[in-house]
Amino acid sequence: MVTERQQDILNLIIDIFTKTHEPVGSKALQESINSSSATIRNDMAELEKQGLLEKAHTSSGRMPSVAGFQYYVKHSLDFHRLAENEVYEIVKAFDQEFF
């Protein structure tokens, strides 16, 4: 079960990661998520346990897993704001049927 704050964290990590292609640390999220760095790290650890995030290295930040991207597409992406071909490409990329 993903909490609202965890979903916000996952969404923000995906947003940052897709722009930078770098693992995202808790301090990078602290300004946007109104919680302490420790709370964010705990939520990130829980998202990792659920398979939605992964670590590139022991001391690095986290990045979305394939399951994390799939969760984002299913639960956070607003398909109504995308062109039909963009929706098709996203669904095709995950080889999933969402509709």
Image (cartoon, rainbow, N blue to C red):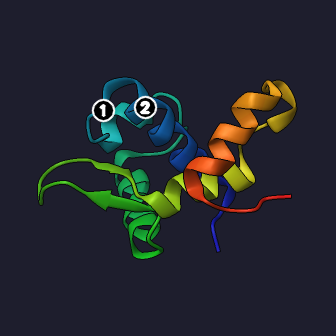
Q: Name above or below for residue 68 compared with residue 88.
A: below
Q: Residues within 10 Å of mark 1 (few under 14, many from 20)?
A: few
Q: Residue at x 78, y 26 (%)?
A: 82
User: Is 70 displayed left or right of 58 in the figure?
Assistant: right
Disc sitting over residue 21 in the figure = 1
Q: Residue at x 48, y 74 (%)?
A: 50
Assess whether mark 1 and mark 2 are in contact (beta carbons under 8 angstroms). Answer: yes
Please tell me which residue lies in front, 1 or 79. Answer: 79
Please tell me which residue lies in front, 94 or 79. Answer: 94
Q: Residue at x 32, y 60 (%)?
A: 54
Q: Amino acid at mark 2?
A: Thr
Q: From the image, which quarter does the C terminus lie in? A: bottom right
Q: Residues within 10 Å of mark 2 (few under 14, many from 20)?
A: few
Residue 4 location, quadrant: bottom right
Q: Secondary structure at mark 1?
A: loop
Q: From the image, which quarter does the N terminus lie in? A: bottom right
Residue 91 horizontal/vertical position (percent): 68, 49
What residue would you read off at disc 2? Answer: 18
The answer to whether residue 6 of the structure is visible from this angle is: no
Residue 46 location, quadrant: bottom left
